[in-house]
Amino acid sequence: MFISINQLNKQFLDKNENAATVLKDIDLQINKGEFVSILGPSGCGKSTLLSIVAGLTEATSGKILVEDKEIKKPGKDRGMVFQQAALFPWINVLENVMFPLKKDMSKKDAEAQARKYLKMVQLTNYLDHYPHELSGGMQQRVAIARALAMDPEILLMDEPFGALDEQTRTRLHGQLEEIWMETKKTVMFVTHSISESIKLSDRIIVMGTRPGTVLTDIKVDLPRPRDAYKTEMVEIENHIMSYLKKEIDKVISEEQNHEANI
Amino acid sequence: MKPIYKRIIFFVAIIGLWELGARLGLWAEIILPAPSSVFTSLYNGFENMTLVYDLIGSFRRLFIGLAIALILGTSIGVLIAKSKTADDTIGSTLLAFQSVPSIVWLPLAMMWFGLNDKAVIFVVVLGGTFVMALNVRTGIKNVSPLYIKAAQTMGSRGLDLFIRVVFPASIPYFVTGSRLAWAFAWRALIAGELLTTGPGLGYTLRYASDFGNMSMVIGVMIIIGVIGAVVDQLIFQRIEKSVARRWGL
């Protein structure tokens, strides 16, 4: 197994020093080259899970192995794209993409590598622009190029298109799918959009909330691009919805109980 | 009407009324000399080079003092941003120092360095250091955690992370700190020069005052005000604005 998440637990201390369980006994195996979505309502811990895989957050217990090596710290084998592009505003697009390459290769090689990935996201005409001069969608494409430029085995994406408008998001879905097929990266894609996950993934891990657990693991076996398979996609969507509806009801009823107790 | 025209009309009116009042003898020349006498004083001052030497002298002290203040302020700022212990001890003292006008250090400075340039430069340094340190500290502490996380996933940590991400990310605060340091240093400089020896704008102002040359006093006041406003608005506020725009603030 390429990525192996075993018995992972994560607890936070809330302000009253009570332990709140965010992730409970997560077990997940991901194959090399697979596009896996982590889908769930807000608060199910899906972003925390991704953050632990990235090495930015420590797990309370359990292990994550990538090719049998345990993950403890962030590393260049795992590129990450956040919901906000997180580009550095003081350097231009090309320099942003060169950022992770500077220590490992000569300036010339780094530039060539950065140009290659900026070409892949079709931003060759914006190399000397600064982040504030780009639209949200373009910024996110630079962020994707930046993550890819260090040629990681794994691409971690935390709701990367969540802050974009519908049309931009649809265009970027297409681009991401092409890039994925071209680069054959293993992708972990966190989202709360059911249709987004169906459109993009080989597998969808549906997560429930309070505590965050894996509800089900759904294989999406449709040819790509999937725009021609609307009926099948709606079927899967309904299937996932039946799982999530219970979760959403649970959240709502908890909130109502909470209000009643005040 | 454009603001610039309003401004011009306003100044012409003020100076006109002022000149008119002085010509009509509504008040004595020693109380408030006419703008034309002020202008003559300024003209003579520049022609016989005294004001030029004053400007050179003042700016020399200012640049030395401000440079030391910026370097020292940045070092202290970085230290208290990075070390909790330093922040709890030095950091809490800084605010107290900052609220003391730096000119009150002059008597001590004169004991330490004598009645000379060094004493004035010392006061200028104190004027700029604390405000720079406080801004640098705020800047470093306010670096978006997202930038840091992003850099970490790209293999940056430790000193590399500080130099390539934390430091540039807090540049807007460095600029604001420098602007405020300049403003405090400029005031401290003039105050210090009033009480020490020349050449320098403050010294010439006091010298003119001792000889009842009020038109020169006003002339020097105008020079001080114009330089202060020009440096602040034309240099620092422009840099501040363009930095804020690019940094997305």
Image (spheres, grey):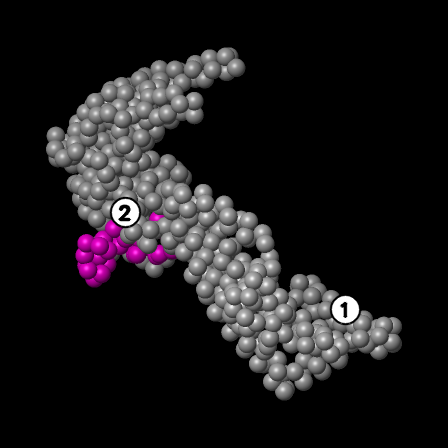
Q: Chain of mark 2?
A: B
Mark 1: few/some/many CA within 10 Å (<14, 14-19, 20+): few
Q: Is residue B199 above or below residue A4?
A: below
Q: Label for residue A34?
A: none
Question: SS for tag 2?
Answer: loop
Examine the image and state in which quarter residue B191 appears: bottom right
Q: Chain of mark 1?
A: B
- The residue nearer to you, when weighing A185 against A238, is A185
Q: Position of residue A199 (x, y in %)?
A: 27, 32
Q: Is residue B200 above or below residue A62?
A: below
In the image, the segment drawn in magenta is: A85-111
Q: Residue at x 29, y 37 (%)?
A: A56
Q: Is residue B142 above or below residue A115?
A: above
Is B100 magenta? The answer is no
Mark 2: few/some/many CA within 10 Å (<14, 14-19, 20+): some
Residue A12 seen: yes
Q: Residue at x 84, y 78 (%)?
A: B23
Q: Position of residue A243 (x, y in %)?
A: 31, 17
Residue identified by numbered label 2: B157
Q: Residue at x 34, y 29 (%)?
A: A193
Q: CA distance from mark 2 to mark 1?
A: 60 Å
Is A96 magenta? The answer is yes
Residue identified by numbered label 1: B14
